[in-house]
Amino acid sequence: MGPTLINGLPAHVLLVHFVVVLVPLTALALVAATVWTTWIRRLGVVLPLLALVTLISVPITTNAGEWLEKRIPSDPLVRKHTDLGDTLLPWVVALFVVAVAVWWFGRRAMAHSSAHMRTHARAGLSGAVPLGMPVRVAAIVLSVVVAAGSVVQVYRIGDSGAKSTWDGGFSTTPVSGKGR
């Protein structure tokens, strides 16, 4: 599934950048849309589409990483990175599901609110539809938990990948004759 080499380089080292950008971006968009309901209107279908692209990018990147893992020497740091890498997909699935639910229910609430406002206007009444506060608080908490969990996992996975790549691979002092 997906590319293993891109322009002669292992695809994983390039694809990982999509995941590192998309997961936090999706998490931020989800929390913004849940906390500030006007963002549902602003983002529209972009929120679930962004979550879908993020979801698709994770197994493609993981697959490319598994391909690469079979082609490098076995190392405890690499094993830790690959083990952590396998933990991201459930978080991103949850991110996608919550993003779709927030978008779907947000659209329905806006449609209901518009119909309610028209009915009240015809009757000479004013006021908006009261939001179900317990449902809204639960959505906010769930969004924040899923967003934070997915971003923390991306950080942990990236940190372990950087350590597995760079551990012992550079000098803390300049190499003689190169720079100051």
Image (spheres, rainbow, N blue to C red):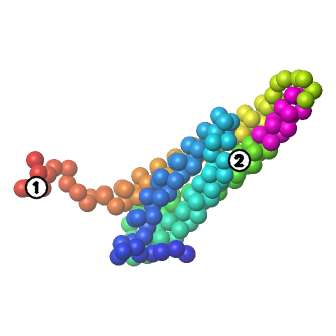
Picture coordinates of residue 126, whole percent (x, y): 84, 23
Residue 144 in view of the camera: no
Callout 1 amino acid: Lys
Picture coordinates of residue 145, whole percent (x, y): 63, 42
**Residue segment shown in magenta:** 109-121
Q: Residue at x 55, y 75 (%)?
A: 1
Picture coordinates of residue 11, whole percent (x, y): 42, 70
Q: Quadrant of residue 92?
A: bottom right
Pointer 2 or 1: first along the chain: 2
Callout 2 amino acid: Trp
* Callout 2: SS: helix
Q: Is residue 54 above or below residue 146?
A: below
* Callout 1: SS: loop
**Residue located beneath label 1 in the image:** 178
Give the crowd class for mark 1: few <14, some 14-19, many >=20 residues within 10 Å: few
Marking on residue 160 = none
Marking on residue 103 = 2
Residue 11 in view of the camera: yes
